[in-house]
Image: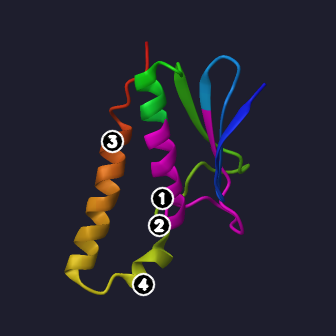
């Protein structure tokens, strides 16, 4: 039996009976998945949950995949760039993404 963990718009996130987390991206209303503010916030929530579950020993690993037929993630959502008006805006956005990406590389799963 699978257990849905978080209710998200663009990701299906659940744990299977073997204690493996599954994060499946399917960006709504888009032919390809992109990483933008909304999909990125949801990904960060997934990684935070995964880290806590791994630290408790509740999970053995995690699979991240796309349910789109042709690609995983095409890249950044360039539409998000329109709201960046100053150098400080750009720096803040880069810092937010960097924090999420470095955190996701150091998750404590068992080997």
Residue pictured at 68% horizontal, 67% vertical: 30
Specify whether residue 11 is painted magenta. no
> Closer to the camera, 74 or 40?
40
Residue furthest to the top in view is 111
Which quarter of the rendering shows the C terminus?
A: top left
> Closer to the camera, 70 or 99?
99
* Numbered circle sitting on residue 95: none
Image coordinates for residue 87, horizontal then vertical, percent: 21, 80
Image coordinates for residue 21, horizontal then vertical, percent: 59, 30
* Numbered circle sitting on residue 82: 4
Residue labelled with disc 1: 41
3 or 2: tag closer to the N-terminus: 2
Asked if the residues shown at circle 3 and circle 2 are in contact, with their CB atoms under 8 angstroms apart, the answer is: no
Image coordinates for residue 24, horizontal then vertical, percent: 65, 43
Specify whether residue 34 is painted magenta. yes
Cα distance, mark 2 to mark 1? Answer: 6 Å
Q: Residues within 10 Å of mark 4 (few under 14, many from 20)?
A: few
Label 4 SS: helix
The answer to which quarter of the image holds residue 27 is bottom right
């Amino acid at each position: 039996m699978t257990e849905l963990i978080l209710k998200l718009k663009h990701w299906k996130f659940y744990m299977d009976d073997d204690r493996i987390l599954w994060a499946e991206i399917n960006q709504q209303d888009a032919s390809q998945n992109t990483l933008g503010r909304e999909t990125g916030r949801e990904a960060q929530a997934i990684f935070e949950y995964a880290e806590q579950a791994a630290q408790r020993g509740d999970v053995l690993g995690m699979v991240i995949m796309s349910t789109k037929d042709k690609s995983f993630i095409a890249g950044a959502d360039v539409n998000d760039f329109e709201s960046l008006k100053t150098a400080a805006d750009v720096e803040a956005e880069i810092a937010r993404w960097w924090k999420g990406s470095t955190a996701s590389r150091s998750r404590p799963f068992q080997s």
